[in-house]
Image (cartoon, rainbow, N blue to C red):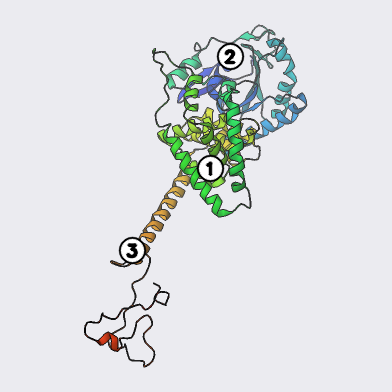
Amino acid sequence: MNANHPETSASARGRQVTLRSAAELADALPFVLGFHPTDSVVLVALHGENGRFGGRIRLGIPRSSGEWDSTADHLAEVLVDMCAQRGTPPDGIVGFLCQDPGPGETAREVNERLRPFAQRLRTACGALDIPVYEVLCISGGRHFSYCCPHPACCPPEGTPLALGGTSVMAAAAAYAGIEVRGSLREMEARFKPTGAPGDAQQRAALDAAAADIVPRVVDGAEEEGRARLRETTLALAARLLAGFAEPPRRIGADGARRGQAAVDADDDALVDSGDAAALILGLQDRLVRDRLAEWMEGPEGVAAGRLWRVLARRCVTPYEEYAAAPLTLAGWAAWSTGDEPTARVALGLAIEADPEYVFARLLHQACNEGLDPETLRSCLRQEREARTAAERAAAAAARRTRTRTRPRGGRPGRPRPALPRAGTGTARRGRGTPGVRHAGRAAARPGSPAPRHGGRRGTRSGR
């Protein structure tokens, strides 16, 4: 490791852990991100004399080396700007290039292939007057230093990574309850179609739902039809959410812990292809999506995250772009319930599905900047409370209207015919009171029925 690199401290929920070597720095990366990055470039900001870990940014390594220069410039600018907005520009940066060897490739060859990218990261940060203390390549279970010239501590063939759970950082993270959720590739797979035979059935269901729903959600569609579709979609989502009320079954009948794939398969079984297609298509309406974003706290938020993950897995070819909505909701539910690593993965996939999806971009930026999700939760609560109050007021007004238009003994919806005031029946000779039949000679004869109010059917009485 470069001798000029200061001791770097990482915080594990209040516990200070001092990292003194490249090996400890490499081992700390999964705990900083919450997962093992794969095919990723990661920059972490350092603050203060002791190099306290601060903001971090991750991006997939571009496949084309022609994009490395622009990617390095962009990452350096974003990280520095992000830290400056929070009031503490970085005093240094450490970088990581994480990529497994390809077929027939060794970890050392990966290290050499990515060396120009590492050098470009250093110059990009240096152009912003931020020193880069270390850049590590992590590949094939080994780490390599691009900054340390001493083969005694950083040999050219690399150094094996520490065994999982044996480092100081791993012990501190376990004490603090920090969990590493596997590799990035494994986390992303939980949000993508499985490629199972059921994908064909889901594709057919999406085709059928699209023919019915898409014309009702596109711009220019009849507003009344869109309103009915919104209510139908919200009711469907509420019905499906009820199926996720119980926590997933993580312990099998034999007492062994069930794998994540088995748990996800249980969730998939709770939603059939027709309901999944209808909800995926209905979520393309922004108002529906915003209403369902209110499922964001406690057990309801966790259950909603499981439902959105199921829907994201159902966005099979050629409906990948439709996954932006459920992925964004999954990311928001994860962030709101405290699962930031999952939130970043889901929101990153949402942007990949639709780079112009504004809600996903805003949430991704806010999550990466370490903002408090309570600000958005408060806004959504206020909107829900205002809507609930308006619905209650409208229902009360409707009840009052029904009461006025349904007098006791009268016919529903028809006002009781007005009777003439006493003494006015013959006040205007030749012109009777509208709706009242004159009491002539026939009506005055003994035994004749009383005068009938209202006149003939079809007159102004409304009968």
Q: Is residue 366 visible?
A: no
Residue occupied by mark 3: 403
Question: Quick one: label 3 or label 2, which is nearer the N terminus?
Answer: 2
Q: Few, some or many C-alpha atoms within 10 Å of disc 3 (few <14, some 14-19, many ≥20)? A: few
Measure the C-alpha gap from mark 1 to mark 3: 37 Å
In the image, taking residue 253 as reference, residue 16 lies left or right, namely: right
Question: Quick one: label 2 or label 1, which is nearer the N terminus?
Answer: 2
In the image, is residue 297 above or below residue 455? above
**Residue 461, picture quadrant:** bottom left
In the image, taking residue 365 as reference, residue 231 lies left or right, namely: left
In the image, is residue 287 above or below residue 171? below
Q: Secondary structure at mark 2?
A: loop
Residue found 61% across the figure and 40% down from its top: 210
Q: Amino acid at mark 1?
A: Arg
Measure the C-alpha gap from mark 2 to mark 1: 47 Å
Q: Tell me the quarter of the image containing the C terminus.
A: bottom left
Residue 21's mark? 2
Q: Few, some or many C-alpha atoms within 10 Å of disc 2 (few <14, some 14-19, many ≥20)? A: some
Q: Is residue 235 visible?
A: yes
Residue occupied by mark 1: 289
Measure the C-alpha gap from mark 3 to mark 2: 79 Å
Q: Secondary structure at mark 1?
A: helix
Q: Are marks 2 and 1 in contact (CB under 8 Å)?
A: no
Question: Quick one: label 1 or label 3, which is nearer the N terminus?
Answer: 1
In the image, is residue 12 above or below residue 141? below
Can you give x and y, in whole percent of width and height, for residue 439 in the image? 30, 86
Residue found 36% across the figure and 85% down from its top: 433
Judge by depth and name the residue closer to the eye, 60 or 314.
314
Judge by depth and name the residue closer to the eye, 335 or 428.
428
Can you give x and y, in whole percent of width and height, for residue 318 in the image? 66, 32
Q: Nearer the viewer, mark 3 or mark 2?
A: 3
